């Protein structure tokens, strides 16, 4: 696999994670668009992603922890609006992990971690 930077991994991870969250919530019977949107935010906001990371951090391998750190430490031009910078960076690390696993085609591992989160 090409060695992507932390921001690129986070970009892909964010998109994949949001899709999986939406799918999960639809399967839970939340089908009205506004209610679905509000529920998705609980998972995909920086705070929601930080909580997700906390749920799985003890399950991560050393390599996965390194990806989280790479994403966390990635230089970005965006400034968080609704959270502390530290939380925003950790949520970016979470997104990078999801992106890394997706691009690595580690679908079983990705499914395992998402099952813990969702």
Image (cartoon, rainbow, N blue to C red):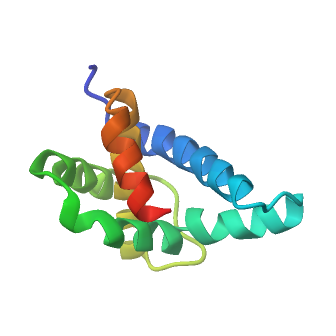
**Percent coordinates x, y for residue 23 in the rendering:** 66, 48
Question: Which residue is most to the left?
Answer: 62
Horizontal placement of 56 versus 29: left or right? left
Query: Is residue 6 in sight in this rendering?
Result: no
The number of callouts visible is 0
Displayed quadrant of residue 34: bottom right
> In the image, is residue 34 above or below residue 81?
above
> In the image, is residue 92 above or below residue 87?
above
Q: Nearer the viewer, residue 112 or 98?
A: 112
Q: Nearer the viewer, residue 58 or 45?
A: 58
**Percent coordinates x, y for residue 4 in the rendering:** 31, 30
Displayed quadrant of residue 103: top left
Q: Residue at x 35, y 49 (%)?
A: 112
Question: Which residue is most to the top?
Answer: 1
Q: Residue at x 26, y 20 (%)?
A: 1
Q: Residue at x 35, y 53 (%)?
A: 113
**Percent coordinates x, y for residue 87 in the rendering:** 40, 74
Query: Is residue 56 in sight in this rendering?
Result: yes
**Percent coordinates x, y for residue 12 in the rendering:** 49, 37
Q: Residue at x 25, y 26 (%)?
A: 3
């Amino acid at each position: 696999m090409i060695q992507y930077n932390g921001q690129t991994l986070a970009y892909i991870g964010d998109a994949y994670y949001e899709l999986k969250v939406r799918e999960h919530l639809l399967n839970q019977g939340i089908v009205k668009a506004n209610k679905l949107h509000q529920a998705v935010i609980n998972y995909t906001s920086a705070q929601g992603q930080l909580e997700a990371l906390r749920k799985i951090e003890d399950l991560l391998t050393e390599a996965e922890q390194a990806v989280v750190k790479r994403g966390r430490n990635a230089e970005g031009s965006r400034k968080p609006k609704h959270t502390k910078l530290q939380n925003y960076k950790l949520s970016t690390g979470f997104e990078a992990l999801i992106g890394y696993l997706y691009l690595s085609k580690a679908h079983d591992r990705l499914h395992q971690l998402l099952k813990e989160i969702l």
